[in-house]
Image: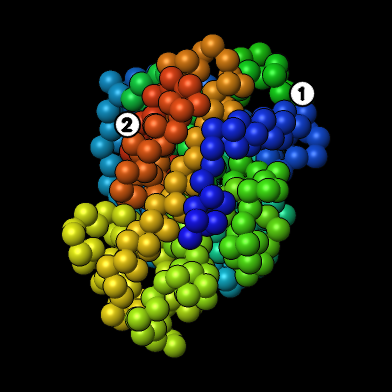
Amino acid sequence: MEAIRKQYTLTVDDQEEIIKRFTNEMLNGLKGEKSTIKMIPSFVTKRPTGDEKGDFLALDLGGTNFRVVLYHLLGDHRNTQDEKKYRIPEEAMTGTAEQLFDFIAKCVLDVNPPDNVPLGFTFSFPCLQFNIKDGELCEWTKGFSTSGCVGKNPTELLNEALKRQGSSIRVAALVNDTVGTLMAKCYEQNNCLVGVILGTGYNCAYVEMANNIPKWKGSKEGEMLINMECGGFGVLDGYRTEEDIELDKLTPNPGAQYNEKMVSGMYLGEICRRLMLKLVKAKELFQSATIDENGHIHSYMEFGTPNLSVIEADGSVDLEDVKKVLEEAGVHNSTLEDRKTVKELANIVSGRSIALAACDITAICRHMGEKSKDCVVGIDGSLYKLYPGYHSRLVKSLVGLKQTCLVELSEDGSGKGAAIIAMSTVH
Ligand code: BGC
């Protein structure tokens, strides 16, 4: 246990080293040189004022849920919305492009949107953008492996599916969820300069000056929001553990998204599961318990991060909720000592996620310089919203790195932001 604690706990010196490496990758990415951080210009060059008005449709595809939302921007920093959520069928996540995009198009029709309403498509995967509405999927992340999409333009794939379904609606803007999150927060208050998603996946966007992007061939005037794709940050030698290395090999995208695989909600439960088994093997855990052979504790990706949330939230003397989670995973008759160890493991794994996210936010703020001092970092995503203590521990880690930015929830950033960007294409 001691070795695990040591390996997973990042000291401020470790964090400074990671910040240095991250910054280096950011700069390489901006230059268009080889880098694990893509630094993609989003073609979004103006932030909203909060006065914008009108009805806009947003599609939000990025995790296991898919949302169609009709936003009514009311001006005065306010909006209302009508929304419908759908679960993406497994066959659409792993089948063909036509299956996935026909499913999406059918959901759009299902909400009966007004004709020709501008559509913002939040497509939360690494996409190189050619303009505000067109791009090319570089690779899938987060467990998607739908064929016929990599190298293709998601906007075209969706427009064709909409046509097939007899709809006249067409995509007006292709948006990454981090860029959407930043824009949505700006609609509420103007000084948001960083957008972060801490959910199934992990990524950041920030406001760069166009003349600070050597690879950018367009106008050097004004601002450009950058979709960093920093879940891909991979210069993490010395920090990736045996669990990270083994987990990565089993994902549909081995060798990619190292940072995301240490930070995001998709993987924290699995890392913890591996650590529990490691301690069982070392005879330090569950020595008097019985473990079902077919229990989830033995199945790859079956011990989800929501379990860690329950474990960390359990403040009871006997750790009754931890016991329940373990029972469900196939571990019976755990001792209180076992449960305390499991709780500590969850805390160690989430702590590393938080420390890494704090490194990246710090690197971005330091890169932006003076103007980042009292800027707002808008964050959305299930990990940030639902994991007990994530926000306060992130703030603490940032303070430890001498950051003075404000970390705030960007409520429904990924959808609302796309609507705001779709609006900018018609005004
Ligand atoms: C994707 C990003 C996205 C992030 C959060 C990552 O897997 O590559 O584009 O912003 O997840 O949803």
- In the picture shown, does residue 251 fall above or below 5? below
Residue 316 rendering spot, x and y as whole percentages = 18, 58
Q: Which residue is located at x 51 percent, y 46 percent?
A: 9
User: What kind of element bears circle 2?
Assistant: strand
Spot occupied by residue 205 in the image (x, y as percentages of width and height): 55, 33
The residue under the point 47% across, 15% down is 373
Residue that numbered label 2 is attached to: 73
On residue 256, which mark appears?
Answer: none
The answer to whether residue 2 is left or right of residue 141 is left
Q: Is residue 74 left or right of residue 102?
A: left
- What residue is rendered at 43% in x and 16% in y? 374
Q: How far, Cα to Cα, is label 2 from label 1? A: 35 Å
Q: Is residue 86 visible?
A: no
Q: Amino acid at mark 2?
A: Leu
Name of the residue lying farthest toward the right: 33
> Which residue carries the number 1 mark?
214
Instruction: Tell which circle, 2 or 1, labels the residue nearer the N-terminal end.
Output: 2
- The structure residue drawn at horizontal position 20% and vertical position 64%, both measured from the top left corner, is 318
Q: Which one is nearer the viewer's eye here, 15 or 70? A: 15
Q: Nearer the viewer, mark 2 or mark 1?
A: 1
Residue 357 on image: x %, y %: 51, 39
| Label 1 secondary element | loop
